Image: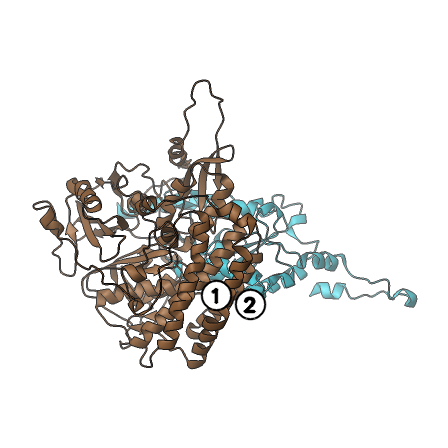
Amino acid sequence: MATAIETQTVDLAARFPGIVSADSRPGYAGFMIPKENLVEVATALRDELGYDLLTSLTGVDYIAENKMEVVYHAYKTTGGAGIVFKVQVERVDPMEIPSLTHLWHGVEFQEREVWDLFGIKFANHPDLRRILMWEGFDGHPLRKDWREPFFEEEVKPYKSRWPEGKHTFAEDKNIFHDNLKFPKDFDPEKYVVDKEEDLYASLERYTLKDEAGKMKTDHIVVNLGPHHPSTHGVLRVAVTLDGETVIGLKPVMGYLHRNHEKIGERNTYLQIIPYTDRLDYFNSMSNNFGYVTTVEKLLKIQVAERAEYIRVIMAELSRIQNHLIFVGMLINDLGSMYTPSLYAFEERELILDIFEAVSGSRMMCNYYRFGGVVRDVSDDILQKIKDLVFDRLPAKTDEMERFLNENEILVGRLKGTHVLSAEEAINYSVTGPVLRAAGVPYDLRRADPYSIYDRFDFDVAVRQNGDMMDNYLIRFDEIRQSIRILEQAVKGIPQGPINSQKPNYQIKAPAGEAYGRIESPKGELGFYMVSNGKGNPYRYHVRAPSFVNLTAIEKMCTGTKIQDFVALVAMLDIVMGELDR
Amino acid sequence: MENEKLSLPNYNIPEDMQDVVAITTLDRLYNWGRRSSVWPLMFGLACCAIEMIAAQTARYDMARFGMEVMRPTPRQADMMLVSGTVTKKMLPVIVRLYNQMPEPKYVVAMGACASGGGPFKEGYNVVAGIDKFLPVDIYIPGCPPTPQALIAGMIKLQEKIDKESLKKVRWYNKEKKDGNYVPMPILGPDLIDVRRNAEYKQAAAKTTEESA
């Protein structure tokens, strides 16, 4: 059962008197650090106080106070509550704060994202380029004074649609009659296209210096993707090869950047839920879970008891189908085209049937609400879940393991490739099964329990070697643990209301901030929300596990063969919808 | 349905040859050969791609209609299934893939995003529908469309192929030499559709006048 968890956070202001001050704004927590002392304080946090996992980094544009803020969330891998620290800079270009990449490599992409979307520079960052948009894009989109071409009003619901519903096409309002925005006096014929020199220059640093007397070999740069059958969507990777060996690698993303955060900041709280479905589109239930948990933190409301059980059941079913697909797709990428995936999809369809029965949609469930869920689970659906959980899924998991685990090719390809040590995994802010396969038993359902996970009896799946084989096996371990949770949940589900709140379309959250996180099948799914007391979030940030886990790909791939890279992309279990948002 | 009319045999086939000889039109034969071997480009953009995969699996089995041979390279594909949100950053790649596909080629916009921007239309990096650049043959509604809806859309495409005539199709049209070549858009301060350069220049100049 759950162990007592240290909830006490350290008083950073007492540790650094005169430098660090507590964040005193109402509804806010954490500490303010002057940018000159950021590196010093962060080093102490990591090395003295034991906050070794810096999970989230994001920016907030406080335009009224003329400040830009960067918010950091650090946790201990031993579990417990985390610490929030913030750095503020004057909102005057150029803004610059020190980079923390040399302390935590995991912030590399997140710092690049803040540079791309907010225009805050990070001094001493090894490779500060735009990450989601392309080089040459005009402006930093998440700034509050930056408006998208189809801008209508600051926040929804738009007056033009309500209550008469007189809709005009967004194209008619834009001067270019399209989703476009050009600077004044822009001449397209004179525009010089970016040749991505910066990207290829960043690959240069891997180029091995030819030592005297040794054979000189040429390196070639290969671009995999964004259209490639094994990149799991629209990921692009620029690789420098020496023969077949990868000597340098840079992922390029943003090909599915759907502006989730900008749209989310215009939306009302309720309107965001269907958008979260489309983040990690394998696990809409988990995404809903993470989002409503965060907003409930902000609103400080309780969840109905029956709804808690329904939430856990749906989230765990979602985890099972995600891991099944993972296994199918991994083996697909290893060259066994389609047959194992067909087995995986067979079980997935049965789980999707349950989702469709409760929510009305197979994939985009839009099922969770603040304080509960939207519809009740009827007894016959519960019976279906019981049949699946008690009879079918355990047998089918065994069957898959029996077919695959000792397959010579599989073991030969997976065992010992792409080893990630526990220290490296933590340093790269890797979370989820990939971290646990490296030997760190860090599972948020145990380490920082949310919802009712502290009531269930289950083990945190953990493996020791951190290679591909362990990453593959741990998925089956997790499926078994999920089945254990499901068994207890379907037995213990009480009768009662499914929502503790009255239906409300215009929720107003009190001013303040909240960071909620759940253990999604891919890792820590976090939502950082800032409210200014109105019906829309002032800042809405998604800490996507795929995005942060991908930071480690460079480290894991360098020195291995290119064909193993394809398997590695499958192993990290990335989903582009969540990665690019 | 002029093809239906054309393939009605007006010839009287001698009785002893009726089991051996059938008369039809070249169009009908040509379309029959193509309709059940539409090879899609293996090309997933977003959420819809997952339903596209689901449509290929045992439960829905798109192979029944002869459309299961996903080709990873555009050179071997007949049909581009735009399955998901088209972003500005991805668009040049999609246009390039389309241009690389040999004729005859078809475009199917799967889902709300590919058809018209969908829920993400207001986003600054989203192209409001692939039909702003490529000629779309079939639109499939849904977010995402279920595998059944996808198969229904594919059958609609087959019906469209059935109606084509060798005399009229663009890929045998001598006047239209480059077929459906779409010029590559450029990623500038925003997405530049090179076909509309003059228009952009004019509008951008107007913004200056107004603000001055």
Q: Amino acid at mark 2?
A: Gln
Please say whether residue B195 is visible from this viewpoint: no
Q: Nearer the viewer, residue B172 or A83?
A: A83
Residue that sits furthest to the top in the current view: A213
Q: Is residue A260 above or below residue A357?
A: above
In the picture, one chain is cyan; tell me its letter: B
Q: Write down the chain letter for disc 2.
A: B
| Other-residue count near label 2 (Cα within 10 Å), few / some / many at <14 / 14–19 / ≥20 | some
Q: Identify the secondary structure beneath mark 1.
A: loop
- Look at the numbered discs 1 and 2 and tell me whether their residues touch, using CB distance below 8 Å: no
Which quadrant does the C terminus of chain B fall into?
A: top left
Q: Quadrant of residue B208?
A: top left
Label 1 crowd (10 A; few <14 / some 14-19 / many >=20): some
CA–CA distance in space, label 1 to label 2: 11 Å
Would residue A140 appear left or right of A10 to someone viewing this image? right
- Identify the colour of chain A in the image: brown
Mark linked to residue B142: 1
Chain of the residue that carries numbered disc 1 in the rendered image: B
> In x, y percent, where is residue A36?
15, 40
Give A332 or A180, whichever is nearer the viewer.
A332
* Residue where numbered disc 2 is placed: B148
> Residue at position x 7%, y 45% from top?
A18
Q: In front here: B25 or A406?
A: A406
